[in-house]
Image (cartoon, rainbow, N blue to C red):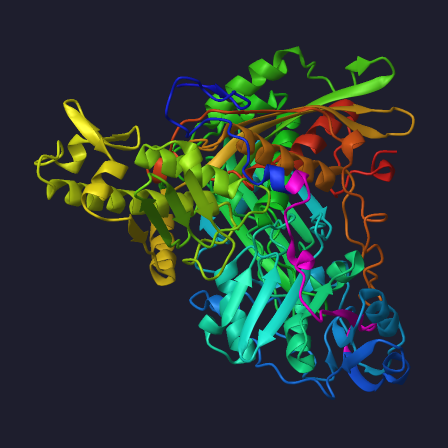
Amino acid sequence: MSIKYAETEPATGTSKYVGQGVDRRDGPAKTTGQARFAAEFPYPDLAYAALVHATIARGRITALDTAAARAVRGVIDVLTHENAPAMKPAPKMSFLDLSSIASGTSVNYLATDEVHWNGQPIAVVVAETPETARYAASLVRPSYQELPATVDFAAEEPNAVPERGIPIMESGADKGDARAALAAAPVSVDLRFSTPPYNHNAIEPHATTAVWDGDHLTLHEGAQNIPWLRKHLAQRFGVPETSVRILSPYVGGAFGGKSRAWAGTLLAALAARATGRAVRLALTRAGVYHTVGGRTPSTQRVALGADATGRLTALIHTSVSRTARIGGMPEPITAASHHLYAAPNIHLAQNVVQLDLLPNTFMRAPGESIGTFAVESAMDELAWQLGMDPIELRMRNEPERGPVGGQRFTHRMLKEAYALGAERFGWSERDPRPGVMRDGRWLVGMGVATAFHPSMRMPAQVTVRLGADGTLVVRSGMHEMGMGTATVQAQIAADEMGVPLESVRVEYGDSDLPPGPGAIGSVQTASAAAGVIDACAKLKKSVLALARRAPGSPLRGRKLEDLVARDGGLHHAGGGQTYAEILTAAGRDHLEAESKAGMLGFVARTVLERRRKVRAATGAQFCEVRVDPDTMEVRVSRWLGVFDVGTVINAKTATSQLRGGIVMGIGMALSEQTLIDGRDGRIVNPSLSEYHVPVHADVPHIDVHYLNEPDPTTPLGLLGIGEVGITGVAAAVANAVRHATGKRVLDLPITLDKLL
C-alpha cells in the first residue's frame, strides 16, 4: 500500500499530471473579479423581477390587490395567476425522464390560485430597477381562504408510512431476525436520534437572467445539471430543447440546491416572455429559503446487539423523513448501514410523512450524512457499554463482503485508513475514561466515526479536438462550482494524449456543448473522465490511421497498443511523430473524436451493479473537542480525516473538497438548523444572521490525508470526493463530546442546553 499526503506539491521532472496539486484554472478569474455569475451578464433594456410570497401554509388566494404596486414609478408589470401566460404543468416523477427529475415542485406557478406552502411565490413584480421591484412587491396585498395544513414534522412523525423504493437508491432490507437477535444479545444499545431541517446557504444565492428571442430562450443560471434543466424548461415552455440555451460558466456553490428548476428560474423565464424584456431575478437570502428545498428532518432508531467480544449479532436502523405533497424524494438515510458492519441479523427500514411544506431536495451526501450520525453514534455508545476501544469495535465488525446482499467490495481500505489515522492523530494517548482529559480548565474529548458514500457514474458526452498546432480542446457541458472541473479534466486529457497541460483547453458550462454529467452524487469527475479517456482513445486511433497512410512515417505498421502518447505525439522505442507532424502531412488542420453515453443504459447498469458489487468512498474521521465545564460551550480543536477515495486526480482540489465537507459537517453537528413554526409552516430563521453556519473561529486546522489507491473497476480508479467528506463528521463530534463530558447527545445540533 502506498500512502500519499494530501498536500503533496506538484512533482517535477515528469510529464504526468494526474495526482499533481495543480492550481485551479478558474482561480485567477474569480479572485480578480473577472468571472461572471448568473446575475452579472449585461443586456440592453434589462428589467428586474422580485417575488411575492404566500404567508399561509395551505389555501386559496381569494384576491390579490396589485394597485399600489402598479402605481410605483418604474414598475413594468405585476404577474399573477389572473394575468400570467400559462406554463405547461410539471411532468410526473420518473427516473427515465430527465425533465421530471429536474422538477423542484409539481406546482404550476401563477397558473393556479392554490397555495401549497408558506413562502410559495404568488406574484412576480417586474420593474426597471431591482430596488423598485422589491419595493413594489412589498405593496402587493393578497387575501386568502385558509385550509387545514399539516406542517409539524414532530407531530406527524408517528403517522409515517413505508417509503416506496427508488431503483438507484438503497432503502429497506431484512436479513435474519434482527429483533429476536437484539432481544437475546448479551450487550445492546437502543437509541433514538433526531436531526433538524437544513438549508444549503451557498455563497451565491440563486439568480437567473432570462432572454427570449422569439421562441428561443437564453438563460444565465447557476446550475448543477444543465441537461436536466434544459429539458425541463423546454417542456414547461413548449419549445424544442434546441431552442433553450443555458449558460452556466461559474456556480458560486450549490451542494445539491441548484440541481433542480425552482420557482425563481421558471418565473424569471416566464416574466421575460410576458414582458418581452430581458429579465433578471436574483433571490434574496430569505427568498432562497422560501423557494429552494433543503434537507429533510429525520428521526432515527439504531439498535445494536453484540456478544461479549464485541461482535455484532443484530443491527436495526430505521428512519422517518419527510417529503411534501407537491414533491420531494425520500432520503437514503439507512443506505450506509447496508455496508458498514458485518452482522448476521439486519433490519433496515425508511418511512416518510408528507407535509404542506416546500419539498426537500438533494443536499451534500443526502441521506448518508444524517444516517451516519445515528449509526456511528450508536456504535460509539456500544463501545462504551462493552468497555472497548471504538476503533477496535469497528475493525472487529469490518465485513469481507456486503453485509446485506453478500456483494463483493470493489475496493475497501477502511482498516488502513483507521490505522493511519490513529497513528497520526495520537489516538493511543486518549484516556478511555469520560470527563478525565483536560487542557487547563477545558474538558478534552476525542471521537471517531466512519465516512461512507457510494460511488456512481452518470452519462457523459465528451468531444476532444486535436489541432495541427498540437493544442487540445475538451468540450462537455460540465459544471464548475468551485471543485476545479476544468483543471482535473485537463490533467486527465494531457496525460492521455501526452501533451503539455498548458496546451489543453476545457470548454464547459454551456448547453450547446455535448451533454455533460450532473455535478451531483460525487459523479461528475469520474463520469467526465470516462468520456475524456474514451474520446482520447478514439482520437489516438484516428491519428495513427492518418500516420499509417503517410509514406515514410515511422508509425507505419505499428499498432496503437505498441505506442506511447508522450511529447506531443505517438512514440515507440525506435521513434515516433508529433501530432502536428502527422496532421500537417495529411493536410488536416484538426481531428475530433466523441464519446457518447445514454441515460437508459446508466440506470440499468447502476441497478445491475448494485446487485453484484459495492463500490464506495470511505474514510475515518478523527475529532478532538474542548468543552467548557461551566457553560458547556463546545469547540472543535483538532480534526483529521483519512480517506480512501480511489485515485486522486488533483492533490489541491481533492483536499479542498474534503475539507469543505468536513466544515459543513461541523456546522451540522454544532449549530445549523432550519426552524419551522409548527402552526403555519413559516421558516423563522431565513438568513445567515439567524441560521448559524460555521465561521473561521469555529473551524480548526483540518488535516486531510488520502490513501490514493485506485479502484480497479472505475476509470483511472476514481471513486468520488465531493460528498464523502461530510459523512461521519457529526457523529465524530458527538462521540468526542461524549468522551469529554460523559453525555450522549442524540438530537442535533449539539447546543449548550443539551449538555447543561
Residue drawn at the location 45% of the way across and 32% of the way down: 649
Question: Looking at the image, which is closer to me, 414 or 521?
Answer: 521
Tell me if residue 74 comes above or below residue 472 in the rendering: below
Q: Is residue 712 visible?
A: no
Question: Looking at the image, which is closer to me, 739 or 142?
Answer: 142
Q: Is residue 478 visible?
A: yes
* Residue 709 position in % (x across, y down): 40, 27
Tell me if residue 26 comes above or below residue 381 in the rendering: below
Residue 371 falls in which quadrant of the image?
Answer: top right
Q: Quadrant of the N terminus?
A: top left
Residue 212: in magenta span:
no
Q: Which residues are magenta?
A: 30-58
Residue 745 falls in which quadrant of the image?
Answer: top right
Image side of residue 678 versus residue 209, left or right: right
Residue 44: in magenta span:
yes
Residue drawn at the location 23% of the way across and 43% of the way down: 583
* Residue 101 position in % (x across, y down): 52, 65
* Residue 73 position in % (x across, y down): 88, 77
